[in-house]
Amino acid sequence: MRDFVSGRARTIPPSGIRRFFDLALTMEDVISLGVGEPDFSTPWNLCEASIYSIEQGGTSYTSNRGLQTLREALSRWLAQRYGLTYSPDREMVITTGVSEGLDIAVRAITDPGDEILVGEPCYVSYAPCVTLAGGTPVPVACGEEDRFRLNPDRVMERLSPRSKALIMNFPNNPTGAVMRREDLKGIADIAVDHDLLVISDEVYSELTYDGEHASTATVGDLWERTITLNGFSKAYAMTGWRIGYLCAPEPICDAALKIHQYVMLCAPVMGQIAALEGIRKGEAEKDQMVREYRVRRNLIVDGLNRIGLSCHVPEGAFYAFPSVASTGMSDHEFAERLLKEEHVGVVPGSVFGEGGKDHLRCAYAVSREDLKEALKRMERFIAANSSS
Amino acid sequence: MDEKDLLLLHLLEDNSRLSIGELAVMTELGPQDAECRIAALEAAGIIRGYNALVDWERAGTGEVAAIIELKVNPERDYGYDRIAERISRFRQVRSLRLITGAYDLQIIVTGKSMQDIARFVSEYIAPMDRIRETATHIIMKSYKENGHAFLEKESGERIPFSP
């Protein structure tokens, strides 16, 4: 029998953290800083709104674009919050999480042979999505020397005549780095000069702790060449509901909508109802969660630096990204031994691509108690290894 | 009072046992600054005290609690204040509020037994001159106190790693 698996599916690598996942499952008393999702439950008023809607029979499809009321509310909110102007009827699609938003965005713009620049380290699905769409991912390192921000010079180095778009994610998973408006101006100039599109994943935008979140499409002339992706998973603790949204100029949005309607039809209505409640009445709960994340960030950054793992202050998301260079171990070795010897789960930075080498991703979306215990165990691990 | 003071209040309300060092790190303040701010909040009467939140049912002391609502004739010039002050002096009274609705005052009372509470109400509260009517509700079970749920949490099913 011939091998039925497509070349593209064969090309993409499995997730780099699978080994750790399998190992952790065999252990007890593991404190995992490996989970990239809020440890809060979805605020109860959002759940109630969804439950009530189900009781009223709200279990059907919605329009392909998503609930009109949700798009209208989002359009107003994006304008107020970030100065983003998108028409709810022509420039917006509610997606099944940002993951789907990314997939349809990439597929809407990629032809075979196109090169798509990807700011790395980044969420693990960007490059595989490009490959699956027939494009070629081209990594652009956002290293520690650039404070994990996207440096225009490094983008220039990776440009080629086949470059079509740039995918970026700020606040960033896994580094917590944030691009300020002035940082984005350099990117805007390149995009205009070299006729690039920018896909901007801003799912952590509400988790920006220091200063304001500058949305990519509001900088320079970027609006007409930006696809903005965002969603409810992180800020509203709604990971399992799978609700995101894609905003883009009409022709690109139409192309993405076509793909969306063929593969997904529409996002789940229950999640859309909960998201609508979040936009309308979820501000206080969200603010409370953001305040707690900020407190935890301060705890973990202080703790990591204290035990000798140098860590910049992440200005957004809920990840600390310390360096393990001082220990003489690689990030993979450190993470694996830390899990085996002290039962603390962290993710090696190189899993997230160039620029992540010699770092760890530590998600601080865990309770303060777990955070303190994890730091205590990491300190013991480092002490044991520096004396040997 | 600024944002840092508010954060200190939230953190202390949630857990008043946090050390000055921890509070300083969490709020991005210097330890001395944090200490001074807390002292100022105490001096201003904004922080009224530091308590443990106890689930007495679990402690198994057999103590019971009741919500007692009172209809009160207010006093000329003083309104409800003087009678409220008298009631609040009883050791059994854990909290006392002026409320709107069918009743005027609401108190939460604790005692060794239901009879203990009944005796307290009938002997001390009901006979007061200005009390017109009382309604006693025994608290059967506390599900949430001061923002803390007393329910057993189901263990989460988070996967140990995710991208």
Image: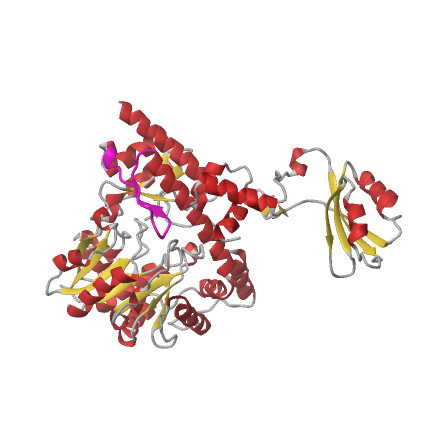
Q: Residue B135: image x %, image y %? A: 81, 52
In terms of depth relative to the viewer, which is nearer, A209 or B115?
A209
- Look at the image and give the residue range highlighted in magenta: A307-326
In terms of depth relative to the viewer, which is nearer, A103 or A368?
A368
Can residue A161 be seen in the rendering of this structure?
A: yes
Vertical comparison of A108 with A334: above or below: below
Vertical comparison of A351 with A59: above or below: above
The verdict on residue A315 being magenta is: yes
Q: Tell me: B63 left or right of A371.
A: right
Task: State the count of labels.
Answer: 0
In terms of depth relative to the viewer, which is nearer, B85 or B102?
B85
For image coordinates 23% across by 33% down, the residue present is: A329
Q: Residue A24: image x %, image y %? A: 35, 37
Point out the image quarter for the C terminus of chain A.
Answer: top left
For image coordinates 81% across by 53% down, the residue present is: B70
For image coordinates 22% across by 32% down, the residue present is: A328
Vertical comparison of B163 with A56: above or below: above
